[in-house]
Amino acid sequence: MKPEKARVSDVPQMHKLINSFADKGEMLARSLSEIYENIRDYFVVRQGEWVIACGALHVSWSDLAEIKSLAVVEDYQKQSIGDQIVEVCLKEAKELGISTVFCLTYKPAFFEKCGFSQVDKMELPQKVWGECYRCPKFPDCDEVALIYHLEAPSKE
């Protein structure tokens, strides 16, 4: 089981998985249309025909991308599946030449374990003014912002 690019046929399962955690207040909900529109951002892990984990790398700016909608079915948590999705997102960001990856989360300890560091959300103005202002929680967001700095890819 390793992360691979999501397919359109994965979207209904991804939607159900993401929103099962959103219903518990553990992440933000995503609409079906939002997932379909951003399908190229998503990675999934499958167990047979079932999507057991998903996560997305969404480019925000020339030097900034966000890991979004990272979710792992509860029975598969604590098996490094989430870590693997973060790894492939960071690898893709590096391949794209993006120097900083961030996330907004209710689970900061997980991302800190992956090498992210907490920052003030105001250090991410492209995110706040490009997307957050549309969120029902704005301006009273209770998610924690974290960033990860990548080395620039070598120009060989």
Image (tube, rainbow, N blue to C red):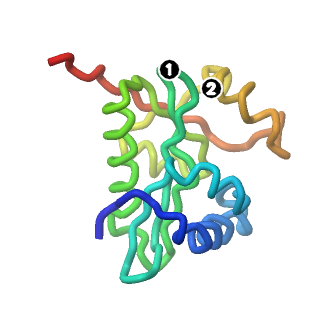
Q: Is residue 71 left or right of residue 45?
A: right
Q: Residue at x 49, y 55 (%)?
A: 55
Determine whether the residue tagged by mark 1 lies in a helix, strand or loop: loop
Q: Nearer the viewer, residue 22 or 143?
A: 22
Residue 128: mark: none
Q: Is residue 38 left or right of residue 52?
A: right
Query: Residue 153: which quarter of the image?
Result: top left
Name the residue type under label 1: Ser
Q: Which residue is mark 1?
A: 62
Mark 1 burial class by Cα count in 10 Å: few <14, some 14-19, many 20+: few
Q: Quadrant where the N terminus lies? A: bottom left
Q: Quadrant where the C terminus lies? A: top left
Q: Nearer the viewer, residue 33 or 64?
A: 33
Q: Residue at x 65, y 23 (%)?
A: 126
Residue 105 on image: x %, y %: 60, 47
Residue 63 on image: x %, y %: 47, 21
**How far is disc 2 from disc 1 in space, using C-alphas?**
20 Å
Q: Is residue 93 above or below residue 15?
A: above
